[in-house]
Amino acid sequence: EVNVRLSLLSREKLLRFRDETGVDPGFRAGGYLFLARQPGTLATLDALREVQRRAGFTGARPVSPEEIREINPAVRPDGLCGGVFCAEDGFLRPLEILRGYVEAAQRLGVRFDYRRPCLGFDMRRDRIAAVRTPAGTLPAGCVVNAAGAWAAAVGSHAGVEVGVTAVKRQVAVTAPFDRLPEDMPMTIFAEDGFHLRVRDGRVLLLRPDPPRPADPLDDAVEPAWLEDMAARARERIPCLADASIRPEECWCGLYEMSPDRHALLGAAPGVENLYLANGSSGHGVMHAPALGQLLAEIILDGGASTMDVRPLRPERFAEGEPNEAPVLL
């Protein structure tokens, strides 16, 4: 439920983002279409709609196999038993959101320095006195760890264990392809997470990677993975048999996964001026506007915030109170 509330708060902020920052975040409602092949998966999707309803959102609706063909005619209907569709879901431009926040912050006097990595902290008892960089130390009032997949390494400088690990997420990109419309909804096959969308005339194909014991920060695109994605795409979206994947334009990034797949938000245990904004577990861009606002409120108002973020407190794992991990990601 807390993830739904974060999404609703982020959406409010994105809808007024241009007015507040002067930059268009590229938000457009193309819809999300979740597809189920098994009755048990369909029951899970229905249960998740109930979670959304309790949090105040009623935009998602169940759809039959016949309705799926109307919403996305490109999908092969064989074996589908139903799904869930939300027309209000959509897409955005992450780098434009970054640009909007950076430019607005700079107008308010914020300085960004991208070439001074954090090498460690100078500690004064239970407080960070300064941040060490290759160009010297920076006195610290408050320090925010928003280091994504590298959050654990940054936390260790202050003796704080941040339970975040990196997981690969690869993206296959086709050559320009005009047989799927730009306004096609994000289409997700719930059983294995295979999903696709159209962006700028190309089709993006994605699927969660299985955990690997090798280098957790490896971000190389794997040829075998691309072959598997092409086969899944052809089988499930028949017209993609005529699309070619461009390996040189594919990319890989890193999710920052927490043990319960919920964000860590708030004061770091044991260090009075260190705050965590980590472990969004695949929801980072989606929830960034909300998490930024909520953490600012926590810092400035002594822990108070617009919404109840107790389920996201960093110490929940030590207290034996993790959230129930989502069944779909």
Image (cartoon, grey):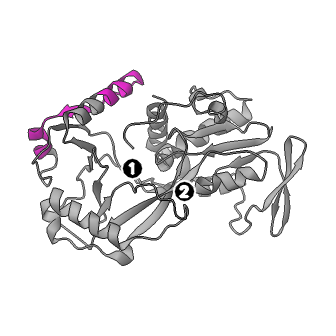
Q: Secondary structure at mark 2?
A: helix
Identify which residue, 129 or 58, lies in the foreground: 129
Counting from the top left corner in percent of width and height, residue 17 is at 49, 46
**Residue 11, percent from left and from top:** 44, 39
- Seen at 46% across and 44% down, the residue is 14
Q: Where does the magenta region start and end? A: 47-70
Along the line of sight, the residue nearer the viewer: 214 or 173: 214
* Residue 293 counted in the magenta span: no
What's the residue type where badge 2 is placed? Leu
For this orientation, the residue located farthest to the front is 213
Image coordinates of residue 277 in percent, x first then y, are 62, 44
Identify the image quadrant of the C terminus.
top left
Report if the CB atoms under discs 2 and 1 are less than 8 Å apart: no
Q: Earlier in the sequence, mark 2 or mark 1?
A: 1
Q: Which residue is mark 1?
A: 27
Specify whether residue 202 is in view. Answer: no
Q: Residue at image x 33%, y 42%?
A: 89
For residue 59, side relative to residue 56 (left or right): left
The percent coordinates of residue 51 (x first, y second) are 38, 26
Which residue is situated farthest in the right direction here? 124
Measured along the vertical axis of the image, is residue 252 above or below residue 45?
A: below
Between 227 and 104, the one lying in front of the other is: 227
Three-letter code for the amino acid on which mark 1 is drawn: Phe
Horizontal side, residue 26 vs residue 163: left or right: left
Residue marked by disc 2: 98
Above/below status of 229 relative to 34? below
Q: CA distance from mark 2 to mark 1?
A: 13 Å
